[in-house]
Image (spheres, rainbow, N blue to C red):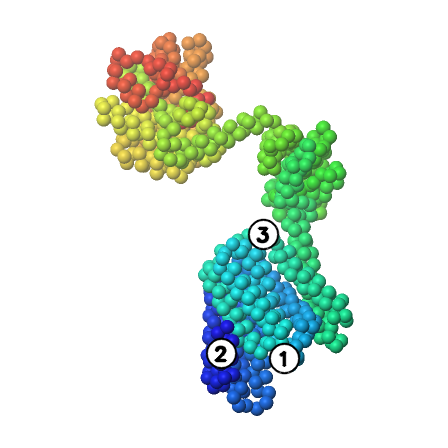
Amino acid sequence: MVAVELVRDAERHPIDGAIGTAVSGCVAAALLISALALRRRATSDPEAPLVWSVMLIAVMIVAGSLIGQSALSAGPPGVAEVGELVFTIACVLAGAVFYQALVGWNRARRGAVDPGEALNGFSAVLVMVSIGNLVIPHFQTIEPGLPQWQFQASLWAGSSLFVAFGAAFSIAMIAELLRDRRIWLVISGLGAVTVAVWIGLVLGDATQQPIPLVWGFAAALVTICVVLPRRVNPVPAVVDASQATIFGALVVLLAGVVILTIDDKFAVDGSRVPAAYALAGVIGASVRVVRLVHDLSSLAQSRRDAMTDELTGIANRRALLAGIDAALLTARATTLLIIDLDRFKAINDRYGHEAGDRVLRHMANTFRALMPEGAMLARLGGDEFAVLLTDAEPGAPLELARSLAQAAAPLSDVKGRLLQVGASVGVATVNKPGVDGGELLRRADAAMYLAKSSGSGVGRYDGAVDAVAQKRLELIEDLHRALTGSAAEREQIVVYFQPQLDTGTGRVAGAEALVRWQHPRRGLLAPDLFIDLAEENELMAPLTGRVLREATRQAARWRAAGHPLRVSVNLSASCLNHSSLLPLIDEVLGAGLAARDLVLEVTETSLMRDPELALVAMRRIADRGVGVSIDDYGTGYSSLSYLNDLPATELKIDRTFTARVTSDPRTVAIVAGTVELAHRLGMRLIAEGVEDEQTLTEMIRLGCDETQGYLHSRPVPAEVFLTWLEAGPARSVPTRQYDQSQPAASPALG
């Protein structure tokens, strides 16, 4: 309204009015430029209208104001009309900038990029102009109103404002901002200006429209940009961008068609102007609809591609998972078969990935030919395929699995090579609700691994077997936490000690460190229940470090208490050549333990896995002055020449010989020979598994240097072991309460 008063004042005081109008135009231009700067900063949209385009609009606003108002006082005929025309064009351009600001706002808010929006908006303006030409002349009965060109120009400006108002409302709705009261201020302001302009058009009094129109556009645009955050956080779209914008295109198309239909009946003086505008709007909206159809077609193709394996042309993992979810909701029984090709990696490694791809395509075609009606064949990835069956007859899934396994026979390559390939098929069926797609996939995968490990080709999901496997996986996770978790979790790994007594004096000469796991739910676990898990999951290094540090710490404690004993720690085959072993030994020796008080035990079978590397490792250990013991001697197949090369200081006879030494003459001969061999090689000999006095007497008679077994003591915690040492000659054998675990079948670390 301020701008309206400026125009009226200009009629009374032409010079002052011209200056005031120019000032108002400059302010409007400044608002537009500021709005653009704010919008560019808020949306970071590189495709936003350039500052120069808005500056051009601002210059046109100022020029139109000056020309139009200067002509009111003095000027050639027609100059005022030129000024009004320039001003009106500037208003239309300002409306276009505002419309693009709204589109950019939606793009920043929703991430929707839709080039058809500009065409849709222009078509809507054309249809609104057509409606104005068709309807407004019927209301202008009192006076003729504006000249035709001025009427058309004002109608264009009013239509641009109306479309901008509709865009503000619809985009605010799409962007989920209708709960924000600030956006309602914007919409209300635009709506008020729109109603005022159209009332002026209907009454034929639109001579004072341009400045309030520019003020409305500029104020609304600035408000929008202020409301918009500096950094927009995009939110997920409620509807697809094409679905959201097609509604506007259809409304424009429908309105244009209606105008063309009724034009002959309602047009004033048979004018074809409304029909021309409506036809142009229909063409623009039609182009938008055609583009939408193309977009939807491309989208459908993209979705098909997203559900198809590119190499084989069958369904991919995404499509399979969607199919499983749908089947679990609708089918009475859902069966999943997992097919894994055997020896496929060897084909890739030997003949290259091109040959591997040919095998995959061939197997996909082979499996496809075997599919029953309604089955879905998919490639999970790599050399894994899957088949989804719904409501299959009993026995049909296993029959299909056997057919698939048999179909994966050796095939001839294009170069005449015979490619050896096979298949392992796992079958899992769900007949009741409560199992999701991920669980069904896991069960089928477990059945496939069962088929692969058994070599049967076909495996059916077994709940009992799977439960054991699940417990094993849980135990692996628990062991990982016990070795690498928090300080409280690492305390679960405990070290027990079993004494080794000198047969000549009866005194304790040393102790063997034996690892135990105080599991929070399963109680005390012997090493044979978790050592293999540690080996398979690369946890032996941290486990050995835990035991070695604790054993040497206790040995230092014994020495401080007046009991200088050596301590023996077992090494597994994987630790023997691990890069962390030697630094670990240096660490514990650097903590104050004498090298002669540390013995590292390695089983005979571990040494024979890689004799050359084992020999190098043993020599590096011996070079540090640390004792080397060959554990379980006699259970492996080591040669005497290899034994001669080892820098060992100790041999330990396995308990299987010790247990028979009182009843088997051949065992007696073996033990006697081993004692003689050890002594001639400068090694002491320790007999394990001494559990009664008769066995101890026989071992002393045969010349064993030291004995170890339940007769002297069970493995006990460090505190109990120290108490037992302090008891001296009157000490008694600790009871079973200290070690409920069974002796380890594999003595590594235990």
Q: Nearer the viewer, residue 552 or 448?
A: 448
- Residue at horizontal 36 percent and vertical 18 percent from the top: 738
Marks 3 and 1, how far apart in space? 45 Å
Q: Is residue 561 visible?
A: yes
Element class at badge 2: helix
**Quarter-of-image position of residue 272:** bottom right
- Residue at horizontal 54 percent and vertical 83 percent from the top: 68
Q: Residue furthest front?
A: 142
- Where residue 297 appears, x then y in whole percent? 69, 56
Looking at the rendered image, the disc whose residue lies closer to the viewer, 2 or 3, is 2
Question: The residue under label 3 is which amino acid type?
Answer: Val
- Where residue 69 appears, x then y in whole percent? 52, 84
Q: Residues within 10 Å of mark 1 (few under 14, many from 20)?
A: some
Q: Nearer the viewer, residue 703 or 34?
A: 34
**Quarter-of-image position of residue 625:** top left
Q: Which residue is mark 1?
A: 146
Looking at the rendered image, the disc whose residue lies closer to the viewer, 3 or 1, is 1
Q: Which residue is mark 3?
A: 238
- Where residue 26 appears, x then y in whole percent? 47, 77
Q: Is residue 423 visible?
A: no
Q: Which residue is mark 2?
A: 6
Marks 2 and 3, how far apart in space? 46 Å
Q: Residues within 10 Å of mark 3 (few under 14, many from 20)?
A: few
Question: The residue under label 2 is which amino acid type?
Answer: Leu
Q: Nearer the viewer, residue 258 or 690?
A: 258
